[in-house]
C-alpha cells in the first residue's frame, strides 16, 4: 500500500517506484494522481451520505455543480498556472528559443483567459457583467465559452484537441519544447479528452447520452497545466551523484 500511495503526490518529483499488485509489479512513468482522484470522486464522494440534509443535494452533485467547489478550484489552478507560466518565461528568456518563449506566453494568456471565463470575469462574484454578452450566452452569463455558437459547436472539440496535444502529441513530437507538458502529466489531459469524446459519441448513439460530469474532468486539465507551469517555474533540484556521501567501509581484522 505504501509503494502505491508514494506515487500520488503531484508536486513531488516523479520517482520510478514499483507498485506491487497481485498480478505483478508496475513501474509507472506518469503521474497516477488522476486515477486516485477519479477513484475518490466516483468510489467515495458518490456514495457519501447526508448530503441532502447538509448542502441540499448529494455531495457528488454539490461538488460538480455550477459555481461549486470544483469550478472555483479550476479558477484558482488556472490563475496560479498563468502566474507560474510568466515566471517560467522570465527564467528561461535568456536560454530558450523564440518559439519556446512564445509558447510560454501563450500558455500564460490561455490560463489567465480560462481563469476569467470560469468566474464569468467576476460576474459570479460581484454580479456585474455585460448585458450584450448575456443576450447571446446559453447560460445568460458574461463569458465567451458559453456563447451559443461556441458552446454548442466548438467547445467540446477544443477540449479534445488541446488535451490530445498537451497529453500526447506535444511531448511525443516536440520533446525539446519544455513549454508543452511533459509525458509525466499525460493522464491529466488524456482522461479529459477521453471523457469529452465518449460524451459526444454517446450523444449520437442509440442510448441515452451519458451524464455530463465535465467539471469533474476539467479539474484535471486545470491541475495538469498548473503542475506543468509550476515544475518549470520552480524546478526541484535533484542531488548529483557526487553530492552523495560515500559509504564508509568497515574493515574487519
Image (cartoon, helix red, strand yellow):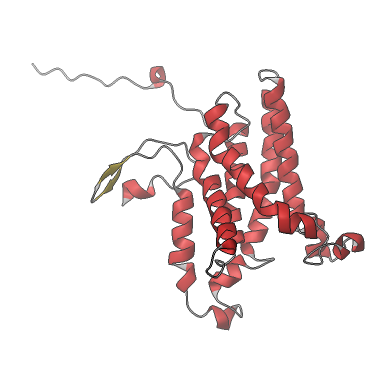
Q: Is residue 42 above or below residue 172?
A: below
Residue at 61% from the left image edge and 54% from the top image edge = 218
Give whichever of 13, 173 is nearer the camera.
173
Q: Quadrant of residue 234?
A: top right
Residue at 56% from the left image edge and 46% from the top image edge = 189
| 166 horizontally vs 138: left or right | left
Give whichever of 212, 27 is nearer the camera.
212
Image coords of residue 32 (percent x, y): 44, 47
Q: Is residue 138 above or below residue 96?
A: below
Give whichever of 249, 172 is nearer the camera.
172
**Is any atom of residue 41 visible in this view?**
yes
Residue at 72% from the left image edge and 59% from the top image edge = 152
Image coords of residue 143 (percent x, y): 80, 57
Image coords of residue 203 (percent x, y): 59, 63
Residue at 69% from the left image edge and 66% from the top image edge = 67
**Is any atom of residue 235 visible in this view?**
no
Q: Is residue 250 above or below residue 234?
A: above
Furthest residue in direction left, as rendered:
253
Image coords of residue 236 (percent x, y): 52, 32
Q: Quadrant of residue 29?
A: top left
Amino acid at each position: 500500500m505504501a509503494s502505491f500511495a508514494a506515487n500520488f503526490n503531484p508536486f513531488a518529483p516523479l520517482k520510478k517506484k514499483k507498485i506491487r499488485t497481485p498480478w505483478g509489479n508496475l513501474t509507472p512513468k506518469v503521474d497516477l494522481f488522476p486515477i486516485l482522484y477519479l477513484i475518490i470522486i466516483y468510489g467515495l464522494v458518490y456514495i457519501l451520505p447526508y448530503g441532502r440534509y447538509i448542502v441540499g443535494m448529494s455531495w457528488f452533485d454539490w461538488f460538480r455543480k455550477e459555481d461549486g467547489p470544483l469550478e472555483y478550484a479550476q479558477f484558482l489552478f488556472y490563475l496560479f498556472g498563468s502566474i507560474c507560466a510568466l515566471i517560467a518565461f522570465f527564467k528561461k528568456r535568456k536560454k530558450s528559443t523564440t518559439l519556446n518563449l512564445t509558447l510560454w506566453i501563450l500558455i500564460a494568456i490561455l490560463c489567465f483567459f480560462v481563469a476569467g471565463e470560469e468566474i464569468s470575469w467576476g460576474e459570479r462574484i460581484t454580479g456585474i457583467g455585460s448585458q450584450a454578452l448575456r443576450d447571446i450566452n446559453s447560460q445568460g452569463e458574461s463569458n465567451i465559452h458559453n456563447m451559443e455558437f461556441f458552446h454548442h459547436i466548438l467547445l467540446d472539440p477544443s477540449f479534445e484537441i488541446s488535451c490530445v496535444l498537451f497529453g500526447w502529441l506535444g511531448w511525443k513530437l516536440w520533446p525539446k519544447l519544455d513549454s508543452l507538458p511533459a509525458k509525466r502529466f499525460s493522464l491529466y489531459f488524456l482522461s479529459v479528452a477521453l471523457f469529452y469524446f465518449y460524451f459526444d459519441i454517446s450523444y449520437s448513439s442509440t442510448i441515452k447520452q451519458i451524464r455530463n460530469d465535465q467539471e469533474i474532468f476539467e479539474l484535471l486539465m486545470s491541475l495538469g497545466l498548473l503542475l506543468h507551469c509550476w515544475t518549470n517555474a520552480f524546478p526541484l533540484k535533484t542531488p548529483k551523484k557526487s553530492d552523495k556521501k560515500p559509504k564508509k567501509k568497515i574493515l574487519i581484522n
